[in-house]
Amino acid sequence: MLANRVRKNFRKLHPRFEQRRIGAFRIYDRDIPEIRAAIDWYEGHLVVAEYAREQTAGIPWLETMARAAADALEVPWRRVHLKKRRTGEKYERLAGKGERIEVREGNLKFLVNLDDYIDTGLFADHRETRALVGRGAGAKRFLNLFAYTGTFTCSAAKGGALQTTTVDASQTYLDWARDNLRLNGVAEGELVRADVAAKSSRSSATTAR
């Protein structure tokens, strides 16, 4: 069932996204209730994430689902990346490979890491909002809080923003954002390491007093 659904979805989605030069998109997301997985395409790679439950502990569902999807799309196993998601769990770093690949999104390019973290560095489902930012950024100053890997900053800069400020609490993600900006051939702007949530909480407390 999963192989058939993945094959059908891919045949429908891939040509449409290729026309728009989009190389990262979701193929499957719990379409079949009994098969609890999300499967994403990244320029010929598959990221297969199981929505794990206590009932599935000890059963190799993840690898079974991944092999079905890979076989359906003829993706080599070395290009399949496995992950497990658990509700309410705080995710630690999964690996230390440090390998990244480029993915296309229209006139933009982003670096993604498919192994080391639960999330890859790109929320592909935000693509339309990124495009909206790019279209509206001309001759404006753009502030990106909780910026993650700076994909929205890239869109704003590419869209002609006068100046950009990218803020995140993680130096790892700020460095990643810098790499994304350089990859797109736009100005780095201001990259600021700061915990916006903590500062907001302190400001609210001061105002209340």
Image (cartoon, grey):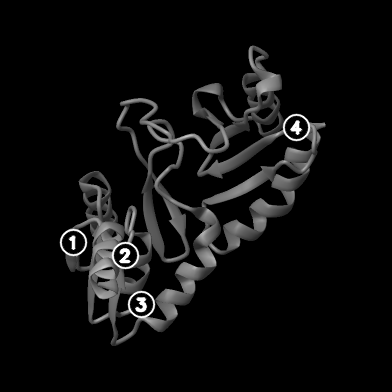
Tell me the crowding category of disc 3: few under 14, some 14 to 19, or many 20 or more residues within 10 angstroms, Cα based. Answer: many
Q: What residue do we see at 31% from left, 26% from top?
A: 96
Q: Quadrant of residue 69?
A: top right
Q: What residue do we see at 63% from left, 26% from top?
A: 66
- In-image side of 156 versus 81 (left or right): left
Residue tagged 4: 35
Residue tagged 2: 145
Tell me the crowding category of disc 1: few under 14, some 14 to 19, or many 20 or more residues within 10 angstroms, Cα based. Answer: some
Three-letter amino acid code of the residue under disc 2 = Leu
- In-image side of 100 versus 119 (left or right): left
Three-letter amino acid code of the residue under disc 1 = Leu
Pick whichever, 62 or 40, lies toward us: 62
- The disc placed on residue 150 is none
Among numbered discs 1 and 4, the one appearing first in the sequence: 4
Q: What residue do we see at 22% from left, 70% from top?
A: 206
- In-image side of 61 versus 2 (left or right): left
